[in-house]
Amino acid sequence: MRFLADWVAPRRRQIFIALVWTALLAAASAAYPPIIKYSIDRLITTEGAKLLPFVLMLIVVITMARALFLYLQTVTTNAIVMRLTTDIQKRAFQHLVEADFARMTREAPGQLVSRLTNDVTFIQHAGQAALNTAIRDTLIIVCLVATMFWLDWLMSVVVLFVYPLAAAPIAIIGTRLRKVAKRTQTRLGDMTSMLSEKLAGARLIKTYRLEDYAAQKVNDNFEQVFGLRMKAVRNRARLDPLLEAMGGLAVAGVVGLAYWRIASGEITVGDFAAFLTALMMAAQPIRGLGNLNAKVQEGLAAIERVYQLLDERPVIVSKPDAGPLRVTGGEIVFENVSFAYDGADDTHAVRDFSLTVPGGKTVAFVGRSGAGKTTIINLVPRLFDVTGGRILIDGQALTDVTVESLRDNISIVSQDVTLFDDTIRANIALGRLGA
């Protein structure tokens, strides 16, 4: 329901237009059986030759109209879904870059990339299935079933008795697929992360001749993804034979009943042919509805993962009464500063650190690896918040000024060189956009 309110409801106008095309497509589809009935019952009479051109022209017109409505419905629904998933990606990335630095480093980049790509692709497929199958095929089935009842209510009851028997197995398979989908999406994130890691470490891999080792690690991940995908395939593959069997039972029941009703004169051969046409036309939409649950379950699993990201709120934010940082001399004071990653009290990266750095002076932190040098630097722009003590700039506590003004007054020349996929000019201008 939350997903519908957040993403679907704002697009109700476009969805209404798609529903119009869908309704016209369903109506055009339901027009075929009456034409079949009319053709068989009338064309075998002496006036049949005169009616033939009209019947053929009517079939061509309905076919062209159905093709047009199908095109418009497909383009409209896919435009809705693709715009929706694009907006999800944009919001998710915006949310991610505005998250705490600790959040961004807690999860491997590949996992985050997977949430923005693989998970959203599952949502896209589910959305397309929902609009193109749940709505379109349902309307087509409703129109065809109405036509069946118009032709013969007793044979329609036989059909409606058979197909619901598949509901329980479909629900069970859908539940299994949702569990598999969650594991697959997590494993795809691991795979994306591992690929990024191995490609980024190409220099190390080549230097130490680790090609076979890296390939084996990645291949193991590929095999795990393959196994999960095959498990999903096997579950989905159970649906088509099930629906095929239900269709066979329905046709057998209709043919047997029709023989008796035609022999008794209750229906004509045209009625039976039209009814069988409607039943055959409904078979594909019914099969689509049977497979719909599988795609929807995969999409629901992906939606859960996306909302796990969107529901996270940054901890490092400006207080309501925070003011802008006013730099005068540029003095930085560390007062009994302590910090532990993830709030772990027993593993402090920095403990009771005090230092005064006068403005305009250069200070070097020297120490062994892991002593907390980089951590101290990261505390100044509030990439992390201290867990004890406080940091002041010109007498102003970092927590008393806005995060935006604090970072606007800080420049960092990192030992890690980062070049974004842009022009040289754009990379240079990143330090002051719009300069």
Image (cartoon, grey):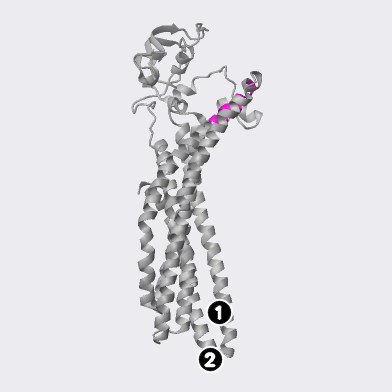
> Which residue is painted at 42% across and 69% down in the image?
250
Q: Secondary structure at mark 2?
A: loop
Q: Residue 136, can we see it?
A: no
Of pointers 2 and 1, the one earlier in the residue sequence:
2
Instruction: List the residue tagged with mark 1.
Output: 58
Residue extending farthest bottom: 46
Q: Is residue 190 left or right of residue 323?
A: right
Estimate how packed mark 2 is, as few (under 14), some (14 to 19) or many (20 or more) residues with alpha carbons within 10 Å: few
> Which residue is painted at 39% across and 82% down in the image?
261
Q: Which quadrant would the C terminus be assigned to in this image?
A: top right
Q: Secondary structure at mark 1?
A: helix
Instruction: List the residue tagged with mark 2.
Output: 45
In the rendered image, the vertical position of residue 302 relative to residue 61, given as above or below: above
Pointer 2 and pointer 1: residues touching (CB < 8 Å)? no
- Percent from the top left, x then y, of residue 191? 53, 34
- Amino acid type, mark 1: Leu
Q: Nearer the viewer, mark 2 or mark 1?
A: 2
195 inside magenta stretch = yes
Residue 416 or residue 136, whichever sits in front: 136
- Amino acid type, mark 2: Thr
> Which residue is painted at 53% across and 40% down in the image?
226
CA gap, disc 2 and disc 1: 19 Å
- Percent from the top left, x then y, of residue 132? 48, 58
Magenta span of residues: 194-203
Residue 325 or residue 69, whichever sits in front: 69
In the rendered image, the vertical position of residue 406 relative to residue 88, given as above or below: above
In the drawing, what numbered circle is on residue 124?
none
> Which residue is painted at 52% across and 55% down in the image?
78
Location of residue 291 (image quadrant): bottom left
- Percent from the top left, x then y, of residue 239? 45, 55
The rendered magenta stretch, by its main secondary structure, is classed as helix
Residue 322 or residue 64, whichever sits in front: 64
